[in-house]
Image (tube, rainbow, N blue to C red):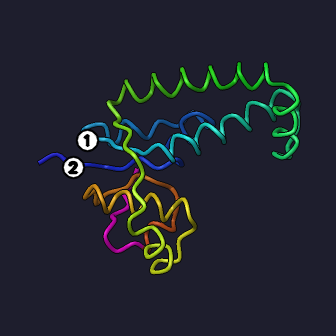
């Protein structure tokens, strides 16, 4: 039986920012992520690209730069879209809609911040029991097994 593994944003960020490929370690599994993870990854990558562009370490300065320079925002987003699409295709990662049916209950039960609770709720809804992540908060969720990558 082939495992299904949810891919959290930390795996994508390690790949794009640090050049570490953890996708290979789970590539024999069915890989799933959600649209909220893709949005989070795109936002983080967008801020990193802007911070590099303006040689600034404060992310709010990067956001200000992007608001004042829509042509750079468009350029960076197109690059990020291309990079993400290639990665999703290469590893056959399916992107699902996040499910919020038990979002608040999961947040309260496990003490998760909103996006993590939404990810856990999505995993529960789709019957996904394994998650590839570097976010230690998911270890608190009793119906998820954090995959060592």
Q: Residue at x 25, y 58 (%)?
A: 127
Up-down relation of residue 65 to residue 61 (above or below): above
How dense is the environment of label 2, judged by Cα within 10 Å: few (below 14), some, or many (20 and up)? few
Left or right: 141 in relation to 68:
left
Up-down relation of residue 127 to residue 41 (above or below): below
Left or right: 109 in relation to 51:
left
Residue 83: in magenta span: no
Of all residues shown, which one is farthest toward the bottom? Answer: 109
Left or right: 65 in relation to 71:
right
Number of numbered markers: 2
Q: Earlier in the sequence, mark 1 or mark 2?
A: 2
Identify the residue under disc 2.
3
From the top left corner, tell me how far across and down residue 95 is, in percent: 38, 39
Q: CA distance from mark 1 to mark 2?
A: 6 Å
Q: Which mark is residue 30?
A: 1
Q: Residue at x 40, y 46 (%)?
A: 97
From the top left corner, tell me how far across and down residue 118 is, in percent: 47, 60
Secondary element under disc 1, as helix, strand or loop, is: strand
Tell me the chief SS of the magenta region: loop
The magenta region covers 141-149
Up-down relation of residue 107 to residue 79 (above or below): below
From the top left corner, tell me how far across and down residue 49 is, in percent: 74, 30
């Amino acid at each position: 039986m082939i495992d299904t593994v949810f891919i959290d944003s930390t795996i994508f960020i390690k790949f794009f920012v640090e050049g570490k490929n953890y996708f290979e370690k789970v590539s024999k599994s069915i890989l799933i992520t959600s649209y909220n993870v893709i949005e989070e990854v795109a936002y983080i990558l967008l801020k990193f690209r802007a911070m590099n562009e303006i040689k600034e370490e404060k992310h709010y300065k990067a956001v200000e730069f992007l608001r004042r320079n829509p042509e750079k925002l468009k350029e960076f987003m197109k690059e990020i879209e291309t990079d993400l699409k290639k990665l999703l295709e290469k590893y056959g990662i399916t992107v699902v809609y996040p499910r919020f049916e038990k979002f608040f209950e999961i947040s309260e039960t496990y003490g998760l911040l909103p996006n993590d609770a939404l990810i856990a709720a999505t995993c529960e809804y789709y019957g996904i029991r394994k998650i590839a992540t570097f976010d230690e908060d998911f270890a608190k969720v009793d119906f998820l097994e954090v995959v060592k990558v």
